[in-house]
Amino acid sequence: MATYEQQGLYQRSVTKRSAYRYRGILVLYQRALGGAPPSLEVSKVFLAHLREQGYAPASLRLYRAVLRNFHKWRGETLGFPIKMPHHNPPYIDAGVVAAMLEFAKRDPRDYLILRLLSDAGLRREEAENLRVQNVVADNLHVRGKGDKDRVVPMTDELAICLKAYCATKKPDDLVLGVSGSAIYRAVKKYARMAGKPEMKPHDLRHAFATRLLENNVNIRVVQELLGLPLRTSRVLRLSCSYLIRIIADPLYRQ
């Protein structure tokens, strides 16, 4: 297991925080082994035990993903089906996002956090890891899940905000320079002020997608902007100029 940590786990395309989290799961797995060698059957029993203990499907998927990568490193394939309940993301009215932004105007950092999530649809971790050098002209060059890169055009408001906030920073500096937890707390703070205390950072990403879809933007465009896989037999490559026109459209910002 220690060899995997050095040669497998920490060599994968994951952040340090995620690697430590995955290592914690491996430590629990190792304790469950009780000195026995790891195997596919033992891993299945381990996951089945977690399910019997009432672990949520989302948690089980995380444990399964960690063990799958471990077994893949060993040249094995772990199969363990997990049924996920289907939950539609909550609908966030545009007025709620506007109210949050208005409240946050007094704090430039918090205002930028909200803009990055709601105007560019960034994930919390993407906003946390965004560097000044990733802000190119009117676009954000974002590295998302699985080290997949995408270009997201900025709204005028986001571009102005970023220019002012990054004026004294160096190219390799982090734009925000705060942890993912700080981003979470900022969103929760202004969500409460706007009357939506249950909101989370990812809900602003959903709100970004919702505004686009409500203005009849092609779903493939939305998938491209969000960095989601296009689940079709053909991958559509969208030009940056087309994406800029979509984001710059006044209808989008209503």
Image (spheres, helix red, strand yellow):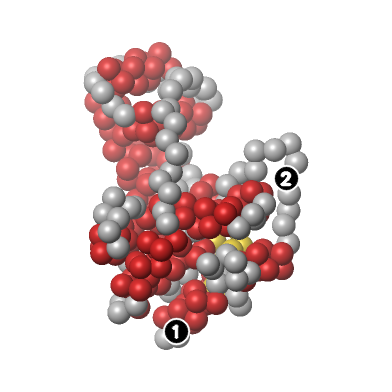
45 left or right of 32?
right
| Image position of 236 with respect to 126: above or below | above
Screen quadrant of the N terminus: top left
Helix, strand or loop status at disc 2: loop
Helix, strand or loop status at disc 1: helix
| Image position of 106 with respect to 10: above or below | below
Please name whichever residue, 98 or 13, is drawn nearer the observer in this view of the structure: 98
- The residue depicted at 46 percent of the width and 28 percent of the height is 68
Residue with the mark numbered 2: 235
Crowding at dot 1, Cα within 10 Å, few <14 / some 14-19 / many 20+, comes out as few
Crowding at dot 2, Cα within 10 Å, few <14 / some 14-19 / many 20+, comes out as few
Please name whichever residue, 245 or 170, is drawn nearer the observer in this view of the structure: 245
Residue with the mark numbered 1: 164
At which x and y percent is residue 211?
A: 53, 57
- The residue depicted at 46 percent of the width and 20 percent of the height is 81
196 left or right of 244?
left
| Image position of 118 with respect to 111: above or below | above
Q: CA distance from mark 2 to mark 1?
A: 37 Å
Q: Earlier in the sequence, mark 2 or mark 1?
A: 1
Please name whichever residue, 192 or 214, is drawn nearer the observer in this view of the structure: 214
At which x and y percent is residue 238?
A: 72, 57
Please name whichever residue, 225 or 15, is drawn nearer the observer in this view of the structure: 225
At which x and y percent is residue 154?
A: 56, 70
Residue 4 seen by the camera = no
Total marks placed: 2
- The residue depicted at 43 percent of the width and 23 percent of the height is 83
- The residue depicted at 32 percent of the width and 45 percent of the height is 20
**Amino acid residing under circle 2:** Val
**Amino acid residing under circle 1:** Ala
